[in-house]
Image: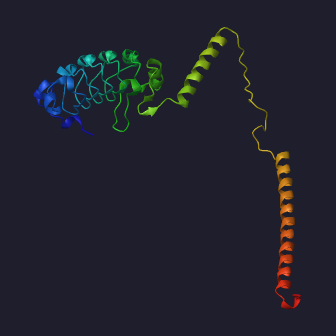
Amino acid sequence: METRNNKDQNPENARITPEMLKSRTGEFDLESILFLKLRGLGLQELGCIGECLNLERLDLSNNYISHLAPLSSLKQMVALNLSCNRISSLEPLASCDNLQTLNVAGNLLCNVENLQCLKGLRRMESIRLRDPVYNLSNPLCANVSYRHAVLETIPSVRVIDGERVTGSGSDLYHLCKDIDNSLKRFIGNGAVEVSGAVKPWVDEGFWELKPSHSSIIEETYKQFNDILQECKELSKRADDAIAQAERMLNIRSDTNSYVF
């Protein structure tokens, strides 16, 4: 992984300019740029990045960026990597309606309230706030329940920090949550009495395997034995028929038995 110590500290490269984007992409029109990787360039300001109106994938990781205002105009953006920067607010991303994947690990997001601005992004599926592989995190990750808070804030999220939280596991999570909330309401209204003793759902020994006699299996064995007996009888008849045929052939081959 590139480190900030290796970044180019040239002031001319600290701000994104049209010339920089055109030289790196080969495009003459900023609106024609669809994919852009500006990783580890020592960038501090986003400059004209907002003019890339059709930009879909953007990598700005490992820079010195702190303000995201120019990104608010990128309505077509699907994937955004802002890891390892100096970001403390994600507010400009609220207008990026098509955003699906967001990586902000290694920034300065202090609490879950910093994510409230993403609540309206209905297509958001993956968000990364912590990356143990590269030892990147955010102050809000110190809260052990931050993932739960992320799910509460952005219900459409399917992956948090690279771990899937949907499928049957997610369904179970939401089901348990609904049941828990319902029980809290009932108990709060005095509609349910909670007993101190917890009883098992089934009787003792319910799950133990027990030998059983099946009439179907017994009938199958009987039919098999009957068929086997019939096969033996047919085999005996076939042997008798062959023996008789051989005797007849032997008599015919004896010339003394012929009558003229």
Q: Does residue 243 lie above or below 121 as drawn?
A: below
Q: Looking at this rendering, what residue extends furthest in the front direction? A: 260
Residue 100 image point, x, y percent:
37, 25
166 to the left or right of 33: right
Counting the numbered discs, the total is 0
Residue that lies at the very extreme toward the top in this rendered image: 189
Residue 110, how many percent across, how many down? 36, 21
Along the line of sight, the residue nearer the viewer: 102 or 256: 256
Q: Quadrant of the N terminus?
A: top left
Between residues 93 and 22, which one lies in front from this camera angle?
Answer: 22
What sort of colour scheme is used for the picture?
rainbow
Residue 61 occupies which quadrant of the picture?
Answer: top left
User: Left or right: 20 with respect to 73?
Assistant: left
Q: Is residue 256 above or below residue 73?
A: below
The answer to whether residue 214 of the structure is visible from this angle is no
Q: Is residue 161 above or below residue 210?
A: above
- Residue beneath the point at 25% across and 28% down: 34
Q: Which residue is pictured at 18% across the width and 35% down the height?
A: 7
Nearer to us in this view, 16 or 52 = 52
Locate the C terminus by quadrant: bottom right
User: x and y percent of residue 247 in the render?
Assistant: 86, 81
Q: Is residue 213 left or right of residue 90?
A: right
Residue lying at the far bottom of the rendered structure: 256
User: Residue 76, position in %: x, y?
Assistant: 30, 21
The image quadrant of residue 175 is: top right
Q: Is residue 236 visible?
A: yes
